[in-house]
Image: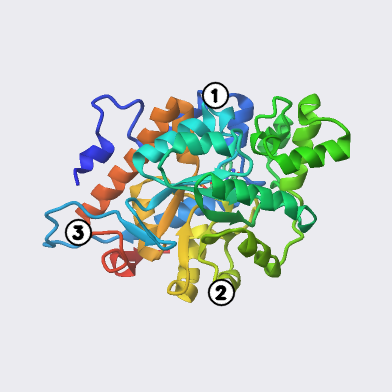
């Protein structure tokens, strides 16, 4: 457990270890449109700001004279498996707008760092290519859920995911339409409708989508990429026609754990637990969907209290450093998804940049726990007793 093996493997890192500088460095390297998209938050950005501020209200209080002669274990258990690190790469669409290698670079870096890769339905690279790049890494599939009228398409996507070694299904519930994002609106930018179709590779390679498109428009996908991209975006962001009862369809068509992403209300968390769903991601999509909402971390506290012993709880929104990961896990998350930080790594250094961000976060987390006298990320060592609240 050589902590510097996580963080300082290279004498000369590709860019800074200072995690709160990744965003400003990446900003200098992005086009106006890509920048507007990745930094795009809902409306005034209130929810996003609250996500970050919520972490500052909690402090990790260190214990002394604890025998910590080895580095803390980062192993975590969830969804019926043991994983070597407690972070995962959050699903982020159209990764090729940040670097030409896009999803391939991220999938390779994730496998190398032993961090699960969550592949988005809005990906710019096909599932099959990503699976190949990810090799024997752990990968999960994030579904944007077409309406019931298009269950044949959903079934096809799930079938492909299973056939390509994606082991868990992450269903995102907060994005049946894209949020009111002034940065994209100002730029007149929709990454999913670009005629170079980079936001649509999953759809364009899907046999059910292809025949649906042909039937409806009387032409092949390749004959009109722009129309095809529009059609695909319409299918995966259909507005929501689903209710809790529709989860039965996913159960029938998915052999493996199901995780619901975007849960904020205690009531919804309870509903999921009562239905026997394996996991939830407490998330507000980084504040990109609904403005004026609560900090996701505040929701985590309440949800853990209500159902922490009944369902696996994952967390995202606002994680920017090792201490943030430790705080979310002390509250009761079993895993934390990393969102924007790895995208900044992708902008700054492709596969190597993503690897650097993941290693830095794990190195920072390890030293944070070690110096606080905390021996592992499991709840017996890292729990509410480690925290002090000063809201
Ligand atoms: C996202 N997110 C997201 N989530 C999802 O389920 N499917 C997706 O395709 C996307 N796409 C996406 C694009 C971009 C550019 C961003 C920044 C985010 C949300 C993502 O999975 C995660 O919930 C948030 O990024 C977490 O917040 P932070 O860590 O970015 O603050």
What is the spatial separation of the Cα atoms under label 1 and label 2, in whole angstroms?
A: 42 Å
Q: Name the residue under label 3.
A: 373
- Indicate which disc, 3 or 1, sits on the residue closer to the N terminus: 1
User: Do the CB atoms of the residues marked 3 and 1 lie less than 8 Å apart?
Assistant: no
Q: Which mark is residue 100?
A: 1
The structure residue drawn at horizontal position 36% and vertical position 37%, both measured from the top left corner, is 112
Disc 2 secondary structure class: helix
Neighbours of disc 3 within 10 Å: few (<14), some (14-19), many (20+): many
Res 355 → quadrant: top left
Disc 1 secondary structure class: loop
Q: Where is residue 363 in the image (x, y as percent from the top left)?
A: 28, 43
Vertical relation: 37 (above or below) 374 = above
What is the spatial separation of the Cα atoms under label 3 and label 2, in whole angstroms?
A: 34 Å
Q: Where is residue 257 in the image (x, y as percent from the top left)?
A: 51, 61
Res 91 → quadrant: top right
Quick check: can you spot residue 23? no
- Indicate which disc, 1 or 2, sits on the residue closer to the N terminus: 1
Q: Mark 2 points at which residue?
A: 270
Vertical relation: 223 (above or below) 208 = above
**Viewer-closest of 230 and 248:** 248
Neighbours of disc 2 within 10 Å: few (<14), some (14-19), many (20+): some
């Amino acid at each position: 457990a050589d902590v510097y093996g996580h963080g300082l493997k290279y004498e000369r890192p590709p860019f800074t270890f200072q995690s709160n500088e990744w965003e400003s460095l990446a900003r200098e390297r992005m086009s106006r449109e890509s920048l507007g998209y990745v930094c795009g938050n809902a409306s005034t950005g209130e929810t996003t700001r609250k996500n970050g501020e919520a972490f500052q209200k909690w402090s990790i209080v260190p214990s002394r004279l604890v025998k910590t002669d080895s580095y803390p274990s980062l192993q975590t258990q969830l969804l019926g498996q043991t994983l070597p690190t407690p972070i995962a790469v959050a699903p982020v669409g159209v990764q090729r707008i940040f670097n030409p290698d896009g999803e391939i670079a991220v999938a390779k870096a994730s496998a190398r760092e032993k961090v699960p890769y969550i592949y988005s339905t809005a990906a710019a690279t096909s599932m099959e290519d990503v699976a190949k790049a990810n090799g024997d890494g752990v990968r999960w599939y994030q579904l944007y859920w077409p309406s019931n009228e298009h269950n044949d398409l959903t079934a096809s996507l799930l079938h492909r995911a299973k056939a390509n070694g994606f082991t868990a299904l992450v269903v995102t519930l907060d994005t049946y339409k894209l949020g009111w994002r002034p940065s994209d609106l100002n730029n007149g930018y929709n990454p999913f409708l670009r005629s170079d179709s980079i936001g649509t590779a999953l759809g364009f390679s899907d046999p059910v989508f292809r025949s649906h498109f042909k039937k409806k428009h009387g032409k092949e996908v390749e004959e009109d990429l722009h129309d095809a991209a529009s059609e695909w975006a319409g299918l995966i962001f259909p507005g929501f026609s689903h209710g809790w009862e529709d989860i039965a369809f996913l159960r029938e068509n998915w052999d493996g754990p199901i995780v619901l992403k975007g849960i904020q209300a205690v009531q919804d968390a309870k509903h999921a637990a009562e239905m026997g769903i394996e996991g939830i991601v407490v998330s507000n999509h980084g504040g990109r969907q609904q403005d004026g909402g609560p900090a996701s971390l505040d929701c985590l506290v309440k949800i853990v209290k209500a159902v922490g012993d009944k369902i696996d709880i994952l967390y995202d929104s606002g994680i920017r450093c090792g201490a943030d990961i430790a705080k979310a896990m002390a509250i009761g998350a079993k895993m934390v998804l990393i969102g924007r930080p790895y995208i900044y790594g992708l902008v700054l250094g492709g596969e190597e940049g993503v690897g650097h961000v993941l290693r830095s976060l794990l190195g920072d987390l390890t030293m944070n726990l070690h110096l606080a006298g905390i021996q592992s990320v499991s709840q017996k060592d890292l729990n509410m007793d480690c925290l002090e609240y000063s809201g």
